[in-house]
Image (spheres, grey):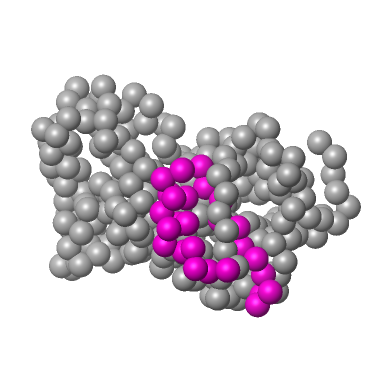
Amino acid sequence: MNNPEGYVRSMQLQYRDAREVIEEFAEEFKAMDGRIIDIGCGPGTVLKDLLLPKVGGNAIVVGADISEAMLDYAKEHHANEKRLSFIELDIETSDLPTNLIAQFHHATAFYCLNWCRNIEVAAGNIYKLLQPGGKAIAMLNSYHIVFDFYLEQQKDPKFSAYMQDALKYFPPHYGYPNPEEKLRRQSEGAGLKVLQWSNRRKVFVYETIDLMLDILMAVNPFLHRMPEDVSKEYRKDMEMRTRNDLRQRIKNENSDETTVDDHYTSLVALFEKPRNEISF
């Protein structure tokens, strides 16, 4: 994601869901002190506005992201916060920098692991980042209908040339009947102890379909590849698919709602690195 300003404008859903998780695990966050790494911090908005006020008063939070553009935005807009700093990090790297190993007491990841194709590697790196006894809280998307749309659009001659790698951008647990169990097995395979985990049905209400489309377009990974005329056609196609889905749901639910309910599911998990460290 190389458009931080656009991403910030699209963050209503992520912001709402992160706030709910922080409120749900309020005691866990309050007990987080020392050095905390927020993996996939993006522009730093959730980190600065929601996470920092809820962790221990002496905690130092390091925002980590793979995107240089996101980090530049975060540094520019949050440079006056003394307890915050930012580093570049690929959580799927096979060569985690040695200066980061066992340097954090706790970790968080809000809708970052969605983008990881290899959760085992990501979980293994979280394990390595943590000190023994450290905890991590993660939230990631497991299903959204937009990924169904991607699969259909990938077969459309108008868009297929720009979407050949569509699966690269799918949540790693998309299509699994029990994504929470798969996440648990992957995390435990990396050495983490899973204390709580669940797959939750979520709804976010948009006032208009145009607002929902604006947000879907802001986080779309293919749009920047398309010429302007194709991108305009692509938005119309996405609107058509969204309206068809909305009409079908209204019919099935016998509803006449005027707002747009966005249905999706999210995984939420609380992990701990055992005090008796496992060697890999």
Magenta range: 56-82
Q: Within the image, what quadrant is residue 230 found in?
A: top left
Depth check, front residue: 256 or 54: 54
Give the position of the N terminus as an image quadrant: top left
Q: Total number of numbered labels?
A: 0
Is residue 198 visible in this depiction of the protein?
Answer: no
Residue 222 is situated, as x and y percent measured from the top left of the image, at 30, 35
Q: Is residue 241 magenta-colored?
A: no
Residue 238 is situated, as x and y percent measured from the top left of the image, at 20, 43
Q: Within the image, what quadrant is residue 225 found in?
A: top left
Q: Residue at x 43, y 58 (%)?
A: 76
Depth check, front residue: 13 or 146: 13
Residue 93 is situated, as x and y percent measured from the top left of the image, at 62, 35
Depth check, front residue: 240 or 2: 2
In this picture, residue 120 sits left or right of residue 253: right
In this picture, residue 278 sits left or right of residue 90: right
Residue 252 is situated, as x and y percent measured from the top left of the image, at 24, 58
Is residue 101 visible in this depiction of the protein?
Answer: yes
Q: Is residue 71 magenta-colored?
A: yes
In this picture, residue 153 sits left or right of residue 115: left
Give the position of the C terminus as an image quadrant: top right
